[in-house]
Image (tube, rainbow, N blue to C red):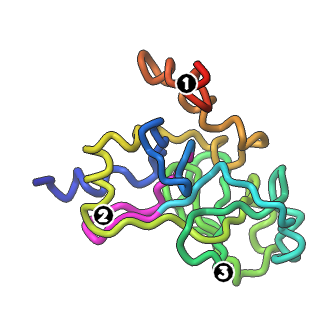
Amino acid sequence: MSSMTEVSSLTGRLLIATPALTDPNFERAVVLLLDHDEEGSLGVVLNRPTGVDVAAVLEPWAELAGDPAVVFQGGPVALDSALALAVVPGEPSEEDPLGWRRVHGAIGLVDLEAPPELLAAELGSLRVFAGYAGWSPGQLEDELIEGAWYVVECEPGDVSCPDPDQLWRSVLRRQRGELAMMATYPDDPTMN
């Protein structure tokens, strides 16, 4: 049905939950796709801050964490595992910094086993996620066909948005046409 290039092209894009998506794990979610190929998809929800300080779980990384410096719930899978994203500002160089793997543009995954001081000079802000969102092969494509998600471009600032509760609306607002209108969709359509 779809060629490989088509399948792998969503890595680094944002999935924005449409009002039709009623799964409570993903209601109003903004998901950054870290991996999307014929083996399935993996991403993190960018707008689910928890009440847990990064310092409480990954103390050595706390001072690199962006604001708010809390752990975010990356999705419903593997909540006991942490992964971190960070933006490396500036032009991509020949070699990525040690302990950082480029996902898309300036956004990359941080190796939390690496010593933080190795990366401190290179990183913009760091965001830590507990868990992730995963889709088996073809599952995300089916959800896209069903209209569960809008697919839009990610901007580096989305990863470290200081006001995650507004991210869903702000990402939609910067789109063109009908998508921008969706930003005004009421939280509870029955109250309209």
- In the image, which residues are magenta? 29-42
At label 2, which amino acid type do we have? Asp
Residue 91 percent across, percent down from the top left: 59, 46
**Residue at (55, 24) in percent of width and height:** 185
Residue 81 percent across, percent down from the top left: 64, 79
Q: Is residue 102 magenta?
A: no
The crowding category of the residue bearing disc 3, from other C-alpha atoms within 10 Å (few below 14, some 14 to 19, many at least 20), is: few
Q: Nearer the viewer, mark 3 or mark 2?
A: 3
State if disc 2 and disc 3 touch (CB < 8 Å): no
Mark 2: secondary structure: strand
**Residue at (60, 37) in percent of width and height:** 168
Residue farthest toward the front in the current orientation of the protein = 190
Instruction: Indicate which disc, 3 or 1, sits on the residue closer to the N terminus.
Output: 3
Q: Which mark is residue 37?
A: 2
The crowding category of the residue bearing disc 2, from other C-alpha atoms within 10 Å (few below 14, some 14 to 19, many at least 20), is: some
**Is 138 in front, or is 99?**
138
The image quadrant of residue 85 is bottom right
**Is 123 in front, or is 191?**
191
Residue receiving disc 1: 185
Characterize the magenta stretch by its predominant secondary structure: strand
Residue receiving disc 3: 80
**Residue at (66, 53) in percent of width and height:** 87
State if disc 1 and disc 2 touch (CB < 8 Å): no
Q: Can residue 120 be seen from the camera position used here?
A: yes
Residue 126 percent across, percent down from the top left: 74, 59
Q: CA distance from mark 3 to mark 1?
A: 33 Å
Q: CA distance from mark 3 to mark 2?
A: 25 Å
Q: Is residue 38 magenta?
A: yes
At label 3, which amino acid type do we have? Asp
Side of 137 where 135 appears, left or right:
right
Instruction: Indicate which disc, 3 or 2, sits on the residue closer to the N terminus.
Output: 2
